[in-house]
Image (spheres, coloured by chain):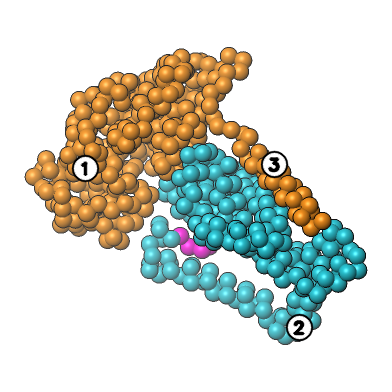
Chain colours: A cyan, B orange
Amino acid sequence: MSARLSGPLLGLVGILLFLLIWEAVPRLGIVQERFLPRASTVLGRLVEYLGQQDFWTSVRETMVAWAVGLLISVTAAVVLGLVIGSSEFLRKATRSTIEFLRPIPSVALIPLAVLLYGAKLESSLLLIIYASFWQVLLQVMYGVADVDPVASDTARSYGLGFAARVRYVLWPTVLPYLLTGLRLASAVALILAITAELIIGSPGLGYQIGLNQAGGAVVEMYALIIATGMIGVLINFGVRFMERRVLSWHSSVRGELLA
Amino acid sequence: MRRTTLITLTAVSALALSACGGSDSDSGDGGSSADGGTTAVTVGVLPVPDTAAMYLGVDQGFFSDEGLDVTLQPTTGGAAAVPGVVSGTYDFAFGNYLSGMVAADTGLPLKYVTNATTATPESGFQAVVVPKDSPIQTPADLAGKRVSVNNLANINDTTIRGVVDADGGDSDDIEFVEVAFPDAVAAVTNGQVDAATVNPWTSSMEDEFRVITYNFTDYTEDLDIAGFFTSNETIADDPELVESFQTAMNKSLEFAQENPDEVRRIILTYTKLSEETVQELVLPVFRTEINRDALEELGKSAAEYGTIKEEPDLDTLLP
């Protein structure tokens, strides 16, 4: 019980300590204030942003790229993962291709994205989809490989059809893996969304960060950077929440709740 | 049984994939398409003061007067401009003349259609600066030092080398470092570089820094910095579009040159520069004619310093 209480509390102390150090560094002149403004100034500006329409427009642009990119990549990865994972032949046939394509950093595709789409949403999507696709695909394939052969054979000998086997044997095994992949992919997708906006100039928070940097508006720049960090925290929180709900029956989650 | 289900699954997934593919490629490129007398035009710009005439022209309706419905597509870096025009994502884009020479040098088919900015006669909107207490006094002193420019192998290092050589220094010994304009002041303040190319240069910076050279103005008199270019394909396929763009852009340049207050007003709308900075800005010259001699000199220097392989053919590059 006490361990659960001190967890969030410790986290809060950590954040406060970080803000304190940040506040002190420019105040003590370790870094000049025009390059690193005080934490209080930046947070004040962020609060101002929360009341501004333009800010929310940028947030929406970023989140649309994130959501659409994630949806496309997860759908494609689940379907392909199930297909490839179910077949020994396909697994072997695609292994080297996947191992070759997967490590290519998505940012290396920036020139291609620029050439194909310019500074638009599509450029963001290309990078997001490429980066998050592999995260989910591999997890789904691991999940399929993890299906208990005894359970699978039992289901078959009891005369369960293909659809029923997928529903009662394959899906429950894959789901925890899929959600892990989703959690990884949702973080990666946000990183790539901001990267595309910052470097290519696709519309969104990243573009606004770049624009403020170019204009020497340092306080605004840091405020927006904090905002992207907070979005990341929220996304992670949301996915974990969903994970707990969807997997409430699973031993990993049950174990966590019992502890 | 197992086999057929697999095949079905494959077919379904292929369908799903193609559906996904369709959804992110349908919004297409910004190519020109006539609808109801107006032509949609996408122009790649940088959100910097140099493109003020373009923003102002759109604001004043000079482009809609010519039947052009302009979408300005700002990018944070200049990297998207040339590939954007070559691939047809942009119909026109803003780019400095040396970037165009480099692109032409690698065989990319593009051509400038109008001027955009020209260096100011005496002082400049851009300068190479050192901290007040620096031992560097003249451009020749830059030899052997670390100097920041926003892009390597481009207009700034080429003109700085020209200035240093003309001053009797050996520009081969300069170590150029790529630092983006917004970070240049920090880099030279913290001693990461000995001198920095800063843009915009404003008079309030004189408290801390000393100007070693206004590298454009000191390089040669009357140097045009940047223009708007398009692909040879657009020029061949749609000469009317190019002509309308030229008419509107030239009108915009003239208007910008005559109305500096309007220029400052519009800069505040698309950059995040502070109001004080914008009031202090030394504005570039906005004019329609291009000084060929100065650009010929720039091309010669670029070839001499190895920025490009051979001198550019200005007949094909300039309007």
Give the image quarter of residue B156: top left
- Where is residue A122? Give x, y as percent: 58, 42
User: In the rendered structure, which amino acid carries the disc numbered 1?
Assistant: Gly
Q: Is residue B219 above or below residue A212?
A: above
Q: Chain of mark 3?
A: B
Judged from this view, the residue extending furthest toward the left is B168
Q: Quadrant of residue B226?
A: top left
Q: Which residues are magenta?
A: A37-41
**Which chain letter matches label 2?**
A
Which element is circle 2 on? loop
Among all residues in the image, which is located at the extreme bottom? A2
Which quarter of the image is occupied by the C terminus of chain B? top left
Residue B286 position, x and y percent, is 34, 26
Q: Is residue B125 left or right of residue A225?
A: left
Q: Report the mark closest to the observer, 2 or 3.
A: 3
Q: Find numbered disc 3 in the image and state the secondary structure of the residue it sits on.
A: helix
Image location (x, y in percent) of residue B264: 41, 33
- Give the residue pinned by disc 1: B306
A169 displayed left or right of B185:
right
Quickly name the residue at label 3. Answer: B19
Mark number displayed over residue A259? 2
- Front position in the image: B179 or A125: A125
Distance of label 2 from label 3 (alpha carbons): 45 Å
